[in-house]
Amino acid sequence: MHVARRTLISLAAALGIVVLAVLPAQAAPSQQDQNWLVTAHQGNLAEIAAGQAALQQSSNAEIRDLGQMIIDDHQRLDADVTAAAGQLGVTLPGTPNATQQAELAQVSGLTGEQFDRAWIAWQITAHRQALAAGEQEVASGSDPAVKALAAAAAPVIQAHLDMTLALAQAYGVPTSVAAGNGGSEAGSSLGLGVGLAAGGLLVIVLSGAALVRRARA
C-alpha cells in the first residue's frame, strides 16, 4: 500500500503534476477570542440600552447627543461582532451580563442632574474597561479577524471616552475611576455602590464584515 502510494506520487512528480496535501480544518477560535466576542456583544447590548436611557431621561443636549451616537455606533458594532461570531461558531448571549443590567437599573432609577452625573461616571468606567478588553484581545487573541475587530474598535472607543471626559469636567464628575480587568464582572467604583462589569462596553468596530469572512476548507 505504501509502495503503491510512493509510486503514484513519483509518477505524478515525473509528469509535472503538483500533489496537494490535504490541509487541516481551520482551528477554532481560542478561548480569548470567544471571550472577547461575548464580552463585546454584551457590552454593545448594554451600551445601546444606556444610550436609550440618556435619550429618555436626560434633558442635557450634549448627553442626549452622545447617547444617540452610542446607540448608532453600537448597532453597527454589534452587526460586525455578531457576523464574526456566526462565522466562527461562537454562541452569543441575548442580554447584557447581570452586573451590567444591575448598573443600568441603578443609573436609570435616578433623575435630573443625579442621573446625568451617574451616567457620565458609568460611561467613563465602561469606556476604559472596553479599551482594556480590546488591548487584551489584540495582544493575546489568536484569530486575525477577531483581533482586527478589536483593533478597529479602539479609536472609536477613545473618541467616546474623550467626549465623556469633557462632560465630566463640565459637571464636576470625578474621572479617576479604574479601568478594571477589561473583561470580568468584578466591579469598579463609580461612587454608586454597584460594580460595573468590564463587559466590553463600547467595544466599537468599524463596519467591515469583509474582515470576518473566512474561507473554510
Image (tube, helix red, strand yellow):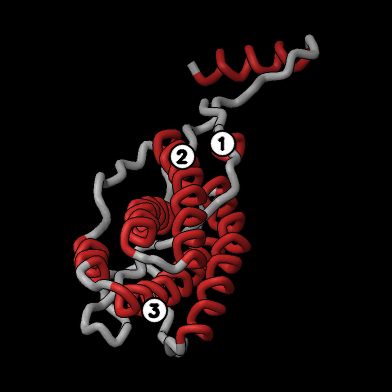
Determine the CA span between mark 1 and mark 3. Answer: 32 Å
**What residue sits 36% from the left and 69% below the top?**
198
Q: Which mark sits nearer the N-terminus, 2 or 3? A: 2
The amino acid at mark 3 is Ala
From the viewer's perspective, is the residue at label 1 or at label 3 nearer? 3
Q: Secondary structure at mark 2?
A: helix
Judged left or right of residue 139, residue 54 is left
Q: Is residue 139 visible?
A: no
Residue 72, x across and y down, in percent: 49, 48
Q: What residue would you read off at disc 3?
A: 121
The residue that mark 1 highlights is 209
Q: Tell which of 22 and 111 is nearer to you.
A: 111
How many numbered discs? 3
Q: Which mark is residue 79?
A: 2
**Residue 195 x/y as whole percent:** 26, 77
Residue 162's spot in the image, x, y percent? 58, 73
